[in-house]
């Protein structure tokens, strides 16, 4: 599982500074934007030749060569790219462009609208194929090409997107590239609600149908946690429903109302997080997720001083590593032939309730002599000195919130294979806490 | 189509006829009997249980006989009711949860039958956080439903599960019964098992809006399993239970709730049930002297929906 830095955290036009900062922060991978946002109806005028505005028509290879070169020079890997996307809004909803598509009699000029849409689709399809080739030439395996959305797709979402994606499937197959769809929200008159692929059952069906038609696993899914939060999705259900189709996860925080990309765990209300990180971690554990974990906190990055960004990048990397560690918690338990716990309290009990049957420890130990040679949750509680007699392939898992103190103690004792266990995101929770008299 | 509204904040125990008459004059022909006011959820969560439902069934029937008579006299049909909720408190004592499931729920079914009400709305258990998955949560809800389904079959009542939300750091996310496909399968499984329409669905527009559900798709997926409605509006952020069409989010000032999708969905499935509003909090927001006017306005919105649907 790769912890990847989102492209917006680096200035792609002048990437050297940012790439060096993220490398220093410990990131080994960068997700790069190689797409182009097609300017839909905003760039068109009925009385002027059709010509897109604000659009860079240079080949992808010219536009993005520099960032790939800089990343190569700095030993930063690129395995995920944001490709082109476009929407099909209703021009009549936007006062500024409505006039462009009005006939003499005042009615909607449907033919003109369709002409623009066709032009747009052709352009994006061409750009997407170019991006796929570019990815293939540069060792990028995943390209995110979000579904086409907008008012004019309503009721025809599958039909429009099926055609769009199938036009790209052959090229992706030839280039051994995996195209990722993504969960989307839509704007319901200012209220962000569920959009295309925000229902996990439907998203699963789309990916499967596209792969079936393509005759190969050309399509996968990128789960945007921010969109899940905006849509109020049960993230655990989303992940387990989609399973291994999820190849990448965008980790970002928001308040569930606005489309922000903030540092994970930073969006809180009183003392509670507003994003269901527990559901995400539980779900990704359940499906043995092993894809790209993209940390996107570009709003946070842009809100802080340039001087603080290196520190923020380091923190972003640590947050990504922490989430990866939580996802791999159970896999981590499989590392050793046998395990021993340190701690005979609530965390030990939670371990035994959730993992005790599957990964039974030899015993647990505790610094409290009164607990030695007693039984706790079916485990013998021993003096930590006993840890000195463990075989080399035995892991010692600290099950106590005083991680650092205990780690120091164990290191001073010469104990090897020291690991942390954590019960913040257990598969299930129990209502009663163990209470002991204060010593 | 018939139009209904909650009895909460209108029908008082001291003189039920007055409240039912007010509903009738406002333009309603049906009501959603608010049985939940007799054991308020806030108190249940605080483990503060009153002894209302501890009374013998005969006494409870006698208590509600006045309401039944008043509704009939005023010409109001009790078309649906809301069971007190929650029926299970995570971390609550065995005594509390036992009382909710073994006393409150069965007696609610008996009262529902006594009032000749065909539908009773219940809340699924909110346990996904504790049990680790929505499937495990549904198993517990399912056990609870099994405990009251025989009474539903006996009395010809349909228990309606409702799309709910849950809170996460002040942010609302989907709770039980927010997946229409799963809900449909589960309802069918129950009804097949009991050989009767013991289970149905109550679509709550406000809850759906809070988690951005696609109204039309949700209602279409439910189809004939949709038995009753909780119609109300909010800002997409808090469960405010206000009047439809009152919330906007942009300068264009068009409703930010998908009422078009709601109507299309109902029309598509040929919904013939009651257009029932769950807007009791509106009545505390407006001055008391405007209550009749406010109720009349809500009933007018019902007639507007009816006009489109018909």
Image: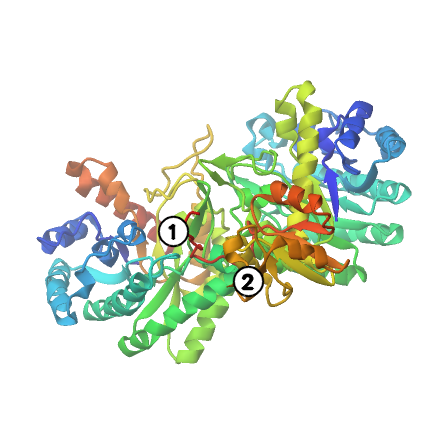
Q: How many marks?
A: 2
Task: Inspect this view and state whether residue A194 appears.
Answer: no
On screen, residue A380 above or below A75: below
| Nearer the observer, A372 or A20 | A372
| Chain letter belonging to callout 1 | B
Label 1 SS: helix
| Chain letter belonging to callout 2 | A
Q: State the separation of the CA atoms marked 1 and 2.
A: 76 Å
Judged left or right of residue A280, residue A257 is left
For the C terminus of chain B, the quadrant is: bottom left
Q: Which residue is mark 1?
A: B308
Instruction: Tell me what residue is drawn at x 65 percent, y 27 percent.
Output: A301
| Nearer the observer, A138 or A214 | A138
Judged left or right of residue A65, residue B148 is left
On screen, residue A424 above or below A13: below
Q: Position of residue B211 (x, y in %)?
A: 48, 47
Q: Residues within 10 Å of mark 2 (few under 14, many from 20)?
A: few
Q: Position of residue B277 (x, y in %)?
A: 30, 51
Q: Which one is in front in this view, the residue at disc 1 or the one at disc 2?
A: 2
Question: Dividing the picture into quarters, in which one does residue B115 lie?
Answer: bottom left
What's the mark number on residue A373? 2
For the N terminus of chain B, the quadrant is: bottom left
């Amino acid at each position: 599982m790769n912890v990847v830095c989102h492209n917006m955290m680096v200035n792609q036009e002048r990437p050297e500074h940012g790439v060096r900062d993220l490398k220093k922060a410990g990131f080994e991978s960068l997700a790069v934007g190689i797409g182009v946002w097609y300017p839909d109806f905003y760039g068109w005028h009925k009385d002027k030749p059709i010509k897109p505005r604000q659009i860079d028509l240079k080949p992808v290879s010219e536009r993005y060569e520099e960032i790939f070169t800089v990343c190569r020079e700095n030993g930063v890997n690129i395995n995920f790219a944001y490709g082109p996307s476009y929407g099909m809004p209703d021009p009549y909803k936007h006062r500024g462009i409505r006039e462009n598509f009005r006939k003499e009699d005042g009615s909607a000029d449907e033919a003109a609208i369709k002409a623009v849409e066709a032009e747009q689709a052709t352009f994006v399809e061409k750009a997407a194929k170019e991006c796929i080739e570019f990815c293939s030439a540069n060792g990028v395996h995943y390209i995110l090409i979000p579904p086409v959305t907008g008012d004019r797709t309503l009721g025809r979402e599958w039909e429009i997107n099926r055609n769009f994606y199938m036009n790209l499937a052959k090229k992706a197959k030839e280039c051994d590239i995996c195209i990722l769809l993504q969960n989307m929200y839509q704007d319901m008159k200012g209220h962000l609600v569920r959009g295309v692929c925000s229902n996990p059952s439907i998203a699963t069906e789309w990916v499967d149908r596209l792969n079936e038609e393509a005759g190969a696993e050309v399509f996968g899914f990128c789960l945007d946690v921010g969109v899940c939060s905006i849509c109020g999705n049960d993230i655990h259900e989303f992940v387990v429903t989609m399973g291994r189709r999820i190849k990448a996860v965008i980790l970002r925080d928001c308040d569930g109302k606005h489309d922000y990309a903030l540092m994970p765990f930073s969006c809180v209300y009183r003392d509670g997080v507003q994003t269901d990180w527990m559901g995400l971690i539980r779900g990704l554990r359940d499906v043995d997720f092993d894809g790209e974990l993209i940390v996107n906190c570009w709003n946070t990055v842009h809100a802080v001083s340039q001087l603080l960004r290196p520190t923020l990048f380091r923190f972003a990397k640590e947050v990504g590593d922490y989430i990866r560690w939580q996802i791999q918690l159970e896999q981590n338990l499989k590392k050793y032939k046998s395990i021993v716990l340190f701690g005979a309290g609530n965390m030990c009990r939670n371990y035994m309730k959730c993992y005790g049957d599957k990964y039974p420890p030899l015993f647990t130990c505790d610094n409290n002599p009164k607990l030695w040679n007693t039984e706790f949750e079916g485990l013998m509680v021993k003096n930590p000195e006993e840890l000195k007699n463990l075989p080399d392939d035995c892991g010692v898992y600290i099950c106590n919130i005083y991680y650092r103190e205990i780690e120091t103690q164990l290191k001073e004792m010469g104990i090897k294979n020291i690991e942390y266990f954590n019960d913040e995101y257990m598969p299930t929770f129990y209502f009663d806490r163990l209470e002991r008299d204060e010593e | 189509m018939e139009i209904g509204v909650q009895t909460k904040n209108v029908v008082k125990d001291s003189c039920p006829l007055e409240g039912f008459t007010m509903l009738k004059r406002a333009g309603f022909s049906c009501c959603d009997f608010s049985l939940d006011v007799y054991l308020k959820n806030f108190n249940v969560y605080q483990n503060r249980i009153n002894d209302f439902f501890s009374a013998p069934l005969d006494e409870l029937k006698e208590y509600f006989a006045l309401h039944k008579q008043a509704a009939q006299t005023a010409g109001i049909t009790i078309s649906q009711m809301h069971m007190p909720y929650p029926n299970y408190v995570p971390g609550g004592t065995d005594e509390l949860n036992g009382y909710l499931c073994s006393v409150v729920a069965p007696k609610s079914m008996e009262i529902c039958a006594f009032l000749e009400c065909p539908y009773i709305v219940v809340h699924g258990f909110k346990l996904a956080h504790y049990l680790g998955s929505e499937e495990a949560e549904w198993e517990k809800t399912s056990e609870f439903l099994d405990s009251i389904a025989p009474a539903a079959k006996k009395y010809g009542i349909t228990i309606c599960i409702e799309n709910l939300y849950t809170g996460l750091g002040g942010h609302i996310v989907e709770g039980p019964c927010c997946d229409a496909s799963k809900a449909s399968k589960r309802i069918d499984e129950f009804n097949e098992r009991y050989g009767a329409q013991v289970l149905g669905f109550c679509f709550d527009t406000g809850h759906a809006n809070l988690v951005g559900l696609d109204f039309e798709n949700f209602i279409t997926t439910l189809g004939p399993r949709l038995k009753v409605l909780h119609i109300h509006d909010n800002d997409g952020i808090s469960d405010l239970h206000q009047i439809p069409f009152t919330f906007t989010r942009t300068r264009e000032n068009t409703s930010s709730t998908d009422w078009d999708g709601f109507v299309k969905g109902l029309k598509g499935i040929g919904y013939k049930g009651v257009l029932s509003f769950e807007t009791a909090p509106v009545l505390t927001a407006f001055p008391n002297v405007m209550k009749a006017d406010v109720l009349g306005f809500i009933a007018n919105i019902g007639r507007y929906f009816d006009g489109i649907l018909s």
